[in-house]
Amino acid sequence: MGNPRTRSRLHPRSAIAAAATIAAALTPFAAAGSASAATDAADATPQHIVLTPAEHPDTAQSFTWQTGSKVTDGEVHLRKAGTQKWSVADARVNEELVSGGVPTRTHSVTVDDLKPNTQYEYYVGNAAKVSATYTFTTAGKAGDPFSFIYFGDAQNNIAEKWSPVVDQAFQRFPDAVGTVNAGDLVDVGSDNGLWNEWFGAMDGYSQTRNVIAAPGNHEYKQADLLRTFKSNFEFPGDGPVADATSTKGMTDGEKQKIAYQKQMQVALAETAYYTDYQGVRFITLNATRSEALELMTPKDLPECHVACPNPIELWLDMQRKWLDSVLRNNPNKWAVAVFHQPVFSASEGRDEADLRAAWLPVFERDDIDLVLMGHDHNYVRGYVDADKTDTAGMTTGPVYAISVSGPKYYDPAPADDNTWTQNGATQVAHAAYTSTFQGISVSKDQIHYESVVAAKGDGSTTDVPVGGTLDSFTITKYDDGEKFVTEAGMPVPEPKSTGKVSNRRTADETTAQQPAKVALGHERIGTLTAPTVAQPGPTTVNPTTGAVYVADGASTGKGRIESVDSTTGKVTASFEAGAPIKDLSYDPAFNGVLVAYQDGRIASFIVSAGHFGDPYIPPIPTGMKVVSVQYDSATGQVFLGLADGTVVWLDGDFKPVGQANVGAGLSAIRLDDATGTLYVTYDNAVDGEPGLRLFDTRNGMHKLAEYALDAGAASLDVDMQVGVAYVGHAAVEGDAENGGLSVVDLLAGKVTRSDKPEFGTSIGGVGVDPARGIVYLASADKSPAPVIVVGREQAPSIDASPVARIAIVGETATFDARGHGMPTATVRWEMRKGAPGNDKWTPIAGATSDVLKVVASKAIDGNQYRAVYTNSIGGKVYSTSSASATLRVVGEK
C-alpha cells in the first residue's frame, strides 16, 4: 500500500484516565452503510474501515480506513476486551486519490505484539472524529477449527444485488473469521462510489473480520493500476522479490530483465502475498497480465531490441518461483491459493493458456489443497485427471473452483468440450447464470467446502433453490501425510498409520540450478514424416504444447493445415483454411494461427483442442498483395508485409494507420511484440544481398540492423528469448535444390549457413520452439522429409523437479523429474542423508531414469533426493541439478 512499509507498535498511555479524557473529547461516528463517504477533503469521519491479516495474524493485525485528503493524521486505539487501558498506534498516511470530484486518502497501520486467540476492542480516527468501537479476535494455534467465506466476482449492482448475498453468507456461516475474495470486487477500480457500495455491503463485517482479496482486471480499469485497491487494503509485504544482482557484463536483454523484476517487485507488493492462519497458508496471486503491463514496466527501462524479456511471461514466472517457494516451505498442514483469472476457464471462448502453463504444474507438484478463482462469472469445481483414484467420488490432489457472487453472468462453455476437458481435467460440479457463496470450514484434519446458491439469473442451469447447497466435498489430510478429497456422502478412508510426519530437513530444500551458457551451435536431430500436405510450406509452433503446424504451400488446393505432435511425430488434427496459404504464424493472444492467403486475404483460426480450425477472425479481403501478417498484442495493431516491400499497419478495426517501405523483395515478417522489433526477410536473387533486416516499429520504423544472406532467403522465424533468427532458403532460378538454413546470431552479429542436403531443399516454412530450442524446416519437395528437425545446442535445463513425499514404512515413494538438453541429456539421481547440515550428495546406483522409486524405512526419514541431468557439448561436460525433495517416513498403524 505504501512505500516504504511501516509497522507500528502500541504505545500505552500513561494512565487510564488520560485515555478516557481523550476518548471523551472525540466525536464517535458509526458507519452508515453504502451511502457513507467522505463529503469533502476536510472530512475526518473514518469510512471504509477494514481489517486485513498480517503475515502472522495470531500476533498482529492490520487496519485501514478512509477520510478526506486534508486529514493527514490518524490513530488506532486498541485494548484487550474487558480491560480499561487503551493503547494507541499511529497510522501511515497514504496518497491522495480523487474520485467523483472528492479528494480522499486512506490511513493504514499494522499493530504487532498482540496475544494469540484474544479478543480486542478498537476504534480509529483522529482528534476531530473517531469511529464506533469494534471488536476482533486474533488467530489461535494451528489445528483450532475456523471457517471463512469465499466470494467470486461481486463487480456489478453491488448495493442492490451483492449486498444481500453478503448478508446471506454471514447468516449461513455466522462464525466465519473473514472473507476470501477472488478479484473484481468492483467494476471500475478508480470509482470511489463503487467502493462505497462494496464497503457498505461489508459494513459490520469488514470492521470485525479479516478480508483477503486478490486484484482482478477491473481493479485496473480507467488507468487506476491498482492505486485504489492498494490504498483500500493493507496486506502483508512478503511477496516476490527481484533477483539481487549486478548488471555488469550483461546483455541489453539481461539488464532489462533485472529492471523489470525490480519494478515488478513494487507492482506485486500486497497483491501477491501470504498469511498463515491457524494451520492454513493463504496465498494470493496477481493473475492479471495485459492490463498490468504499464504497472510492471519501469519508466527508465533500459533499451533492448533483441533477446529481450517478455514482461508478461516474466510477471507469471516471477510469481511462479515465489509460489513454489512458499508452498515448499509451508510450515502449515494446509495451503489455499486465491487469484482472479482461472487456470481452467468456465466460460465460452476463454482460455488462460499462459497462466495454466506457468502455475498449474506448481499447484500439482506441490499438492496445494484449494485453488479459488473468479473472472468467468460461472460456477465450476473440479480436479486434474491425474489426481483421480480407482474409487468413484474420490481424488487425491488439489481442488480447483471458480465462482461468481454478483449478478453478472457469462455463457458457459459446453460441459463436454471446454478448457477442462481439453487439458486433462474434469468438472465435478457446474452451474451457469447462478450466484453463489462458499463456506469453508477448517479443522485439524479436514477442510469441508459448501457452495450455496445465493441468486439465480434467467436461464440458471441448476435446479437447486436459492439457499440450497449446490456443491460440497471434504478434504481429509492425516498426520501421516495421506490425503483424500471425497464427494458429499462418500466415506473417508481411515489412516494407514498413526504416526506423525517429522519436519526433518524440509526447510533446507535446494532450488533447481539454472543451465550454463554455451556457444551457439546447431545440429540436425531428426525428421517428421507424417505430414501429408501436398507441398509442405508455412510452418509455426505452439510453444505451450510443442505442436507443429504445417500448411500446404501449393498454389492450388484449399489450404490444408496439419497439427503434428512433436513427441510422437503423428498428425493429430487438421483443417482446411479454404484457399492456398502464403504465411502461417502462431499467436498466443488468442491461442491460434494467423494466416495470409496467396490471394492477399488475412484470417485467424483457433488451435485449441475441440475447436481446432474454428475461425477466430474469418478471411478478410485487404485489396493488397499481402505475403505475411503479424499481430502486436501490446498495441493492438496488425502488421502486413506486402510483396512490393511495403509494411502496412492496421488498427483494431483493420483500418490502415501507417505504412513504410522496407525494401523490395519482402518475403516474410515476424514481430516481437515485447519490444516492437520487426524482422523482415527478402527473397534475394543472389548470394550476399540483404536477406534480413530489423526495424523498430515503435520508433518510426528505424532500421536497427541488416544481414547479408545467401540467395532465396524466404521463410522466417525468430527465437526471441535467445536472440537468434532462423531463415529458410527456397529454391532459386538455376538451383532447384537450394535450401537449408541460415542461423543469424543477433547478439554477436554472426551468420552461420547450414546448406547440406540433410537440412532440406526448397525450404517453404520455418517454425521455432523457443522453450525447447528446436527448429522445424518444411521442405517443399519433401527432401529428405516433409519436415527436418534441427536442435540448438544447450546445457541441460530442468523442466520439473521432484517434490517432497510422505510414505509409510514399507511403501514405495516415487519421485519424478524432467529435464532437456541438446544433445539429449542423461539423468542420474543423488541422495543426501537427513542429518541437518549434511551437504554431501551421493549418486544412487542404477537410478538413471526420470523416475526414482524408494522403499520407505525409518532409516531414510529426512533423506533428500535430486535429479542431475548431464550432456556434453564440444568435449565439455555440463550438468544441471533439479531442486531437492525430502522423503518423510511414518510408522505403520
Image (spheres, rainbow, N blue to C red):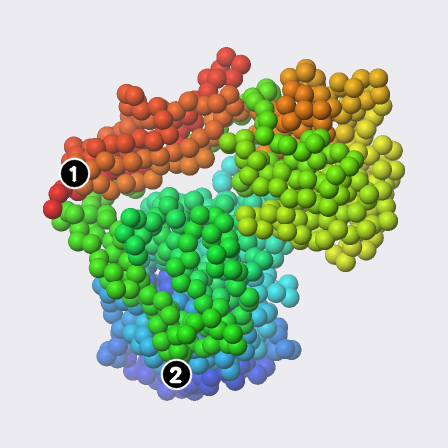
- In-front residue for pair 411/706: 411
Residue 809 numbered tag: 1
Q: Is residue 618 left or right of residue 268?
A: right
* Residue matched to label 2: 132
- In-front residue for pair 283/758: 758
Going by the numbered disc 2, the residue's amino acid type is Ala
Task: Give the residue displayed 47% in from the left and 84% down from the top.
Answer: 33
Task: Give the residue displayed 39% in from the left and 67% down from the top.
Answer: 150
C-alpha gap between disc 1 and disc 2: 58 Å
Task: Give the residue displayed 25% in from the left and 56% down from the top.
Answer: 476
- In-front residue for pair 855/58: 855
Asked whether residue 65 appears in the rendered view, the answer is no
Is 888 placed above or below 774 here? below
- In-front residue for pair 386/814: 386
* Numbered disc 1: secondary structure: loop
Where does the image place residue 202, in percent across and percent down from the top left? 43, 77
Is 601 placed above or below 255 here? below
Mark 1–mark 2 contact, CB under 8 Å? no
* Numbered disc 2: secondary structure: loop
Where does the image place residue 720, in percent across and percent down from the top left? 64, 36
Is 81 placed above or below 281 here? below
Give the residue at the far left of this rendering. Answer: 893
Task: Quadrant for residue 110, please give it.
Answer: bottom left
Where does the image place residue 647, in percent across and percent down from the top left? 82, 42
Asked whether residue 433 appears in the rendered view, the answer is yes
Where does the image place residue 21, in percent across and percent down from the top left? 35, 84
**Badge 1: few (under 14), some or many (20 or more) residues near its Cα, within 10 Å?**
many
Q: Nearer the viewer, mark 1 or mark 2?
A: 1
